[in-house]
Image (tube, rainbow, N blue to C red):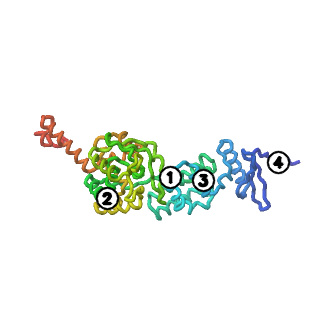
Amino acid sequence: MARKRKQNRRTFGAIRRLPSGKYQARYTGPDGLRYSAPEPFETLTDADDWLAARQTEINQKSWRDPDAGAVNFETYALLWVEERELAATTEELYGRLLRLHILPTFGALDLDEITPPRVRAWHAERRKATGATTVAKSYRLLKGILQTAFEEDELIRRNPCRIKNGGRESAPERSIATVAQVDALANAMGPRWRLLVYFAAYATLRPEEQAELRREDVDTEARTLSITQASPELTTGRRVTGDTKSAAGRRKVVYPAFLDLEVKRHLDWFAEKEPDGLLFVGEKGAPFRRSTFGRKWRKARTKVGLSDNFHFYDLRHTGNTLAAQSGATLKELMVRAGHSTERAAMIYQHSTDERQREIADGLDAKVRRDRGKGTGPADGHAKGTPRARDA
């Protein structure tokens, strides 16, 4: 009598053969729900391997609901922005990046449909269509949204944004206006706006900080400016008054003594007269607008001969660089400029060609003095000594 073949009882999941001859695999997840493989398998071995992989995920605590990623990306992304307490300008930036660069490609997809190949194709297409800086910002935003979906909400198994340095910006070196150019810009802007130029350059104030600067924030005796709030202007023209860019932005800045007369004249002639009156207002007494001021700035910039790439914000670069060359430490630069990170302040500690020449001249003078005291060769090499040995 033939022996009966021993049946192996399956301890995890179940496999059944379909009328088509293919195999369907199913299992019960940790949540108690029944899950099926997305597609039937050609062989019993393939189905068995798939179940083994799911069992391993459950044992290693790495299993995730396969249906969790079936969430529309646009819905998730907009909610992601809404849930964060972002500055008005940052919220506006994220909205613009999503609307123009991210949602046209990924808006109709579910989270689990966004794959590394799709991200790479999108990144390559955007690099051809727009500037590298915009692509880097868009990529960082996309990666941040999907990282939350992966890490915090556990909606996807991995973040599909894996492009090396995809979010890195390589901004061109900022221009540095000379003292003479700053003076020329101030003169070209006219009496009402010249102090705005000087405060940007020599008190390193941001435009949005100057927009909210008030008479009571100025101490002419101590030569200080108290920065407590900012009023950035959105692209819609609406000003949003609130906290400074970061906690480090709340600071007290001492302006140089050569601005004494400029400050006192401005307070007498142009600032609002109330104790809490705005320091900078337009000809009609309203807070200055970026559009109106921008036209004056562009004319002044052209008159002085600066390139179109030189922005009003770059005046801070001039002042901070001069402060660094005057001996300010990294921490002092951070406080003065309102920076919360050392990385932001480090950009002002680079050397200009002029400063390099000053350093070289200083070395030259010191070496010449020491040689004059007989501590070294006066003509570049010792007498009677071969140059090679001297080297």
Q: Which mark is residue 5?
A: 4
Q: Which mark is residue 189?
A: 2
Q: Amino acid at mark 4?
A: Arg
Tag 2 or tag 3, which sits nearer the N-term? 3
Q: Is residue 22 visible?
A: yes
Closest to the observer: 139 or 183?
183
Q: Position of residue 343 (x, y in %)?
A: 40, 45
Please tell me which residue is depicted at 18% across the width and 39% down the height of the picture: 366
Disc 1 target residue: 88
Q: Which mark is residue 79?
A: 3
Tag 2 or tag 1, which sits nearer the N-term? 1
Real-space Cα separation, disc 3 to disc 2, in angstroms: 44 Å
Query: Are discs 1 and 3 less than 8 Å apart at CB?
Result: no
Tag 4 or tag 3, which sits nearer the N-term? 4
Real-space Cα separation, disc 1 to disc 3, in angstroms: 16 Å
Q: Position of residue 51 (x, y in %)?
A: 71, 49
Real-space Cα separation, disc 3 to disc 4, in angstroms: 58 Å
Q: Nearer the viewer, mark 1 or mark 2?
A: 2
Q: Amino acid at mark 2?
A: Met
